[in-house]
Amino acid sequence: MSDLHAQTVAYVRDTMLPEAEPPLTERGAIKWLRENLLSGWVNAILTVVSLYLIYWVLAHIGPWFVNSIWVADSLDECRQIRDAVNNGEPSACFAVITERWQQLLYGFYPSHLYWRPNLAFVLLFVALAPILFDNLPRKLMWFSLLYPFIAFWLVWGGSIWMPVSVLAGLMIAIAAFGIMARFSSLIGVIAAFAAPVIWWLFLAAPVADAVHSLIPIGIETANSKQIGGFMISVIIGLAGIVLSLPIGVVLALGRQSDLFIVKTICIGFIEFIRGVPLITLLFTASLLLNYFLPPGTNFDIVLRVIIMVTLFASAYMAETIRGGLAALPKGQYEAADSLGLDYWKAQRLIIMPQALKISIPGIVNTFIGLFKDTTLVIFIGIFDMLGLTNSIRASTDWNGVYWELFIFVALVFWICCFSMSQYSQWLERKLQTEHR
């Protein structure tokens, strides 16, 4: 009976076994290598080939970086140091960067005024912080709105009343829309566009000069031809990024409008701009635009370039946002209608936030492309970082230096573009709500 009982009663352990280590192939670096580099014979071959290529590149380029020369007054002195210290081994002459970095960053901007673009650059992060991160006080948004005018005054100098008069034009646009929108939304939009344009073209400068004659407040003026290097890329790129997004939203909505005239204008603008190379628009801004302006009009070249770059980026931004709008299910529009929201409230509260979230990769891709395209200004006589490399190499001291300058320019642009890419990925993860 006892034997039968022993065979029918399940064995129950009354003591716990100590925790065992997982197999060696299922933990640590070996597991990572097996899963990521050696998961199959094809991946193993590709891994070996890739490691060999990396080794070959490092073996040939590594010594050139390791033996870099950072202190010298000319390329000839670099070569003398290379022959004396590095026994003639290949050596990068990064001394051109240590000597000319200020020119690469500021162009021909007066050195005693470097504090002004530096201050504008620091304030840029303060202005961007409440826009990029929602956990900061919303009151900082007021500074973000005022920053473009502060930065303009710091970089170009002159009377403080000129940027104030430009800001007044925006106030006029808001007031015109508020007054005329009571009659019709379309009339309000037209008034909001026409009123500030009239103010800026005919009244802003005389009013600013009149106020300055009574209350002279200003700083030393800097010419646009003195602005160059990385600073001009930041100015044009940032202005284009900030302005192209709202214009792109308006164009995307206009392209889907039921009003034939509005839809036709938006489609015509988008298709025309997308069918023309950016360099053509830049040549138009540089050479042809003055022919359409009144005689004696002095239209700053940097402002002309910013306008053309903004229009170019806006067309691509409109199509990116239109893709986000098309990706929204029809139920979202029906939900907005069921809540009794009008068109603008539905777009602001329901439709557009979701469309922009869907369009984040495309929007950031447009921003990155726009920032890199600022190097095209070299063809219209504006010396950005890439253009200044030619000026530096034109000097007898540094004639013959190529890779060091191009590597520095590429590194600066890569840091900026990679930062934008990483922020967009962080924002996508933060706004990911489908699996919550």
Image (cartoon, rainbow, N blue to C red):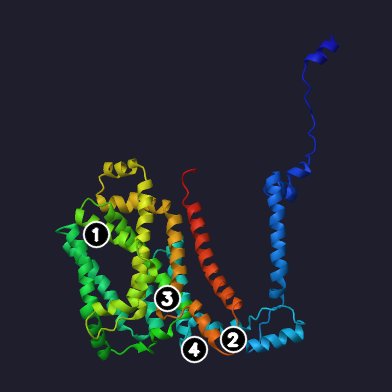
Amino acid type indicated by mark 3: Val
Estimate how packed mark 1 is, as few (under 14), some (14 to 19) or many (20 or more) residues with alpha carbons within 10 Å: few
Q: Position of residue 248 (x, y in %)?
A: 34, 60
Q: Compute the Cα span from label 4 to label 1.
A: 46 Å
Of labels 4 and 3, the one closer to you: 3
For mark 4, what is the residue? 111
Q: Compute the Cα span from label 2 to label 1.
A: 51 Å
Amino acid type indicated by mark 4: Ser
Q: Position of residue 364 (x, y in %)?
A: 45, 60
Q: Earlier in the sequence, mark 2 or mark 4?
A: 4
Answer whether labels 2 and 1 touch (C-beta < 8 Å). Answer: no
Determine the secondary structure under disc 1: helix
Q: Earlier in the sequence, mark 4 or mark 1?
A: 4
Q: Compute the Cα span from label 2 to label 4.
A: 21 Å
Q: Earlier in the sequence, mark 2 or mark 3?
A: 3
Up/down of 247 relative to 149, above or below? above
For mark 1, what is the residue? 265
Q: Residue at x 30, y 77 (%)?
A: 288
Q: Residue furthest left?
A: 183
For mark 2, what is the residue? 398
Tag shown at residue 377: 3
- Nearest to the observer: residue 431 or residue 33: 33
Q: Is residue 372 left or right of residue 348?
A: right
Q: Compute the Cα span from label 1 to label 3.
A: 28 Å
